[in-house]
Amino acid sequence: MPPPDTGDGDGDGDAQADAGSPCAQDGADNGSAIVEFVLVGTLLLIVILGVIQVGLVLHVRNTLAADAAEGARHAANVDVPAVEGGTYAQQLIAESLPGRSDTVCTGQEEEGPGDIPLVRVTCTVVVPLSLVPLGDGVTLTVTGHAVKETP
């Protein structure tokens, strides 16, 4: 049997436990890994859900912008009233984003630089924040423009 070490730090099997070993703390850290896992896991889950929610909102925004621009191009045709661009954009949005029947789109004619006739279609929708409960939702307003054809 080797003689007991005096704890002089020479690493030859001290009888006393090192200060960093679990034995030196008399079980004070028992169960702390579970608590750390729950805390870190919760924070990580919130961050992941937030990133997914931002991605969903951006997807809805990009789809709205594309449909508003398409509505403006439709209303820019000869003999098509500008108001019909808003109706056309709403139909496209209903097909592109199921469940987005609350979208409001309006079309109107306006004058651009140099008296160029333009058609503007503006669409507004409230996107609910379903993954991250931070209020009622985000209101998105997008606008599409097109040059009006003249006979």
Image: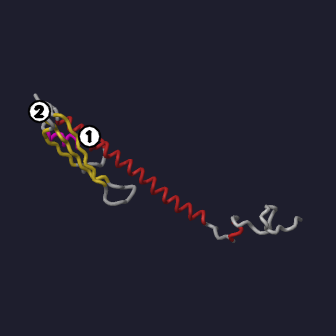
State the residue lying farthest toward the left: 151
Residue 64: % across, % down:
28, 44
Q: Give the amino acid at mark 2.
A: Asp
Q: How is the image coloured?
A: secondary structure
Name the residue located 27 percent from the left edge and 50 percent from the top edge. 140
Q: Which mark is residue 27?
A: none
Residue 98: % across, % down:
31, 46
84, 94: nearer the viewer: 84
Q: Quadrant of residue 31?
A: bottom right
Residue 123: % across, % down:
23, 46
87 within the magenta span? yes
Residue designated by label 2: 79
Q: Quadrant of residue 137?
A: bottom left
Name the residue located 14 percent from the left edge and 31 percent from the top edge. 149
* Magenta segment: 82-90
* Residue 103 horizontal side relative to residue 26, left or right: left
Q: Quadrant of the C terminus?
A: top left
Residue designated by label 1: 67
Q: Earlier in the sequence, mark 1 or mark 2?
A: 1
Q: CA distance from mark 1 to mark 2?
A: 21 Å
Main SS of residues in magenta: helix
Dot 1 surroundings within 10 Å: few (below 14), some, or many (20 or more)? many
Dot 2 surroundings within 10 Å: few (below 14), some, or many (20 or more)? few
Q: In this picture, is 52 found above or below 136?
A: above
State the residue lying farthest toward the top: 151
Q: Give the amino acid at mark 1.
A: Asp
Residue 75: % across, % down:
17, 36
Q: In this picture, is 85 found above or below 42?
A: above
